Amino acid sequence: MRQRSLIAITAALAAGALTLTACGSRDSGDKGSDSGNGGTTVTIGVDAPLTGDLSALGLGIRNSVDLAAKQANKKNYVKGITFKVESLDDQAQPSSGQTNATKFVGEPGVLGVVGPLNSSVAQSMQKVFDDAKLVEVSPANTSPDLTQGPNWRTSKSRTYKSYFRTATTDAIQGPFAAQYVYNKAKKTKAFVIDDKKTYGAGLAGTFTDEFKKLGGKIVGTEHINPDTKDFSAVATKVKNSGAQVVYYGGEYPQAGPLSKQIKAAGAKIPLVGGDGIYADDFIKLAGASGTGDLATSVGAPVETLPSAKEFVDNYKAAGYKEAYAAYGGYSYDSAWSIIEAVKKVVDDNGGKLPSDARAKITAAMQNVSFDGVTGKVSFDEYGDATNKQLTVYSVTGGAWKAVESGTYNGS
Amino acid sequence: MNELPQQLVNGLLLGSMYGLVAIGYTMVYGIVQLINFAHGEIFMTGAFGALTVYAYILPDGTSMWVALPLMLVGAILVATTVAVGAERFAYRPLRSAPRLAPLITAIGLSLALQQAVWAWYPGAKSARTFPSIPGGPFEIGNVTIQTGDIFLVCAAPLSMAFLAYFVMRTRTGRGMQATAQDPDTAKLMGINTDRIIVVAFALGATFAAVGSVAYGLKYGQIDFRMGFILGLKAFTAAVLGGIGNIYGAMLGGLVLGVAEALSTAYISDIPGMDKFGSQSWADVWAFVLLILVLLFRPQGLLGERVADRA
């Protein structure tokens, strides 16, 4: 009797677990694409966090790539080719990213991948894609190591020829924030916090270097643990340090509560972050006291670019449930650069995909150049975007408002 | 420069929350020797129960003073239902199985609960905002206490007092003590041990639910993973205080919370230690403390009050 009930329970639990897994994967499955142009189908892979804390950004990426594929199919942009999107969820984990990369490489129909969101995830994927000569375009990675090698401060060298990105790097974003804070906002004492991840620590490092060079003083540094929500001890330190501004290298799930708790502790100073906090969820999490917080993000605001109006309209018309978020325009441009590369390869081969399509597309990517949502899209010798524009945003009346755009020209 | 009082308060607040959750671990362990790893998730479902009452049952714009008691009731209802259900359907059938079987079941249950909330609770795929108590912070000297923390300041000692009264003075409470000492003899003396075990699970869940409302008010947001790390910390607190001892759980929680706050605040000031003093090292120092305590007092700070067990 005992035995039987044990088996029954085990079976019930296993069935329950399987049902749940099914629910999870259904959500991250490919989300439609227009078929019907006939001919060959080319799959564009998407790897982004589709669940968890960063899903607001990840779902925006997925939807924007889906939109690019739909537009290309509608215009019949590459004759005889139908684009299909397959999205996988990396949960912002490097290990999941690598699994997904291996999966994409194993599917012969996948000729390009857009993603990931996180620099740390990209590190785990680059080699897998490069070995298969499968092109990867990230709309959001900002760590300089990814394109210019680990010693980018002294000698730049490109490690992976198949990796490109439409986002600008921390090597530009951190100093740009430092210049704005010191020169425009006239703050001379900063407290620097990061989450020890590739992205956050990199950003905090480049901010610190530039801020000191300008003559500012770093009155304290702190590294937080991204797994907790209790930053009260850190907030008390910030308050007693006499800082005029807090620079945070990291992402909005921690930045929101951190900003809230710093202000609650009695330090009424703005928190400044990179594109990782430039999300509507940051405002939600930081609450009313988040007004006045600043973020830098790559490119000019999507809404103000004439080239972006069409994207915004099409996105609305397509009726996606989630907003395109911080990286929508870059994701669209990333996907479109793959489409352009496919077009070039197909045109050169008399209207058909060559047998070594992956290698040819990767090679063609280097010379892609077109007017995208975020301006002119092309890549330099390291695979970085040639567009180096950045914008400072501030939280005003419950929304991000652009303060000023500019181009960082080194120091 | 004098940030010690504030850091102590930060640590005590965090520690009270650990303590509230740790009580559930310690009570269940004291009676059935099961480490209920799903307890962190019971804490999480409590928070979502409270949010459900506020967001879906009460009309919009209900004053927090009216809503808060109802949210507390909602949290306790959901958490105890989940805990009692888990006991009845997952743990009771395994009660005479080897120790590892219920432990693995607990881990499985913890994952299942997380995924269930993730999949079926509206908007739970990212963090949900939790209502907050209006009004500015209170200043006592140079110590600031947030309005959201007032609930915790009142609830933690009250819960503790209630628990002490319940265990020491009521019939059921004495039945719990007897079952903890020797379940077989307790049964012979006419104590319905099955009922006592259910009560232990329900009480543990009630305190976790109080803790979860405090968590929501303190941080202003809840998510499906909130119980995991907090559950681990609370379990640590229970071990630190002496697992099986309810006062030990609270004391362990407070010690752990204060240790985390003080290590974040002061270790980086020690010359040569600046690399090891940030908040990301606080957990390391907390566990160093745990190991030191267990080296010298293997039974935990307050020891295991229960008599030796064969």
Image: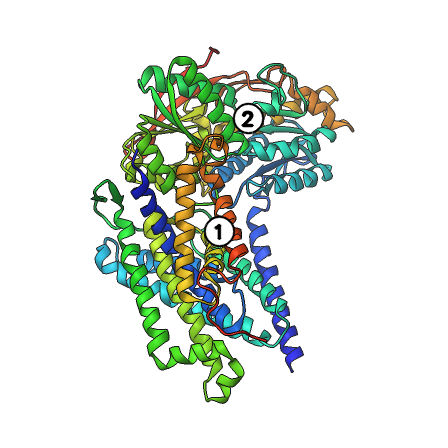
Q: Nearer the viewer, residue A256 or A19?
A: A256
Vertical relation: A170 (above or below) B288? above
Find disc 2 in the rendering and name its residue. A143
Say which residue appears at 22% left-offset and 60% top-offset.
B66
Say which residue appears at 49% left-offset and 18% top-offset.
A172
Find disc 1 in the rendering and name its residue. B229
Can residue A82 be seen?
no
Can residue B296 be seen?
yes
Vertical relation: B193 (above or below) B61? below
Q: Are marks 1 and 2 on the same chain?
A: no
Q: Nearer the viewer, residue B216 or A17?
A: B216
Instruction: Judge depth for marks 1 and 2 and give the one in front.
Output: 1
- Tell me, yes or no, whether the two marked residues, 1 and 2, touch with CB atoms within 8 Å: no
Q: Residues within 10 Å of mark 2 (few under 14, many from 20)?
A: many
Residue furthest to the front in view is B296
Quarter the N terminus of chain A occupies: bottom right
- Dividing the picture into quadrants, the one containing residue A323 is top left
Q: Looking at the picture, how far across and down is residue A194, in whole percent? A: 46, 32
Task: Say which element carries label 1.
Answer: helix
Say which residue appears at 51% left-offset and 38% top-offset.
A58
Left/right placement of residue B95 relative to residue A315 reads: right
Label 1 is found on which chain of the structure?
A: B
Q: Looking at the picture, how far across and down is residue B270, in whole percent? A: 44, 33
Q: Nearer the viewer, residue B9 or B100?
A: B9
Say what amino acid the circle numbered 2 marks. Ser
Q: How is the image coloured?
A: rainbow
Q: Looking at the picture, how far across and down is residue A335, in whole percent? A: 58, 29
Task: Say which element carries label 2.
Answer: loop
Left/right placement of residue B223 relative to residue A104 reads: left
Q: Residues within 10 Å of mark 1 (few under 14, many from 20)?
A: few
Say what amino acid the circle numbered 1 marks. Ile
Say which residue appears at 34% left-offset and 74% top-offset.
B166
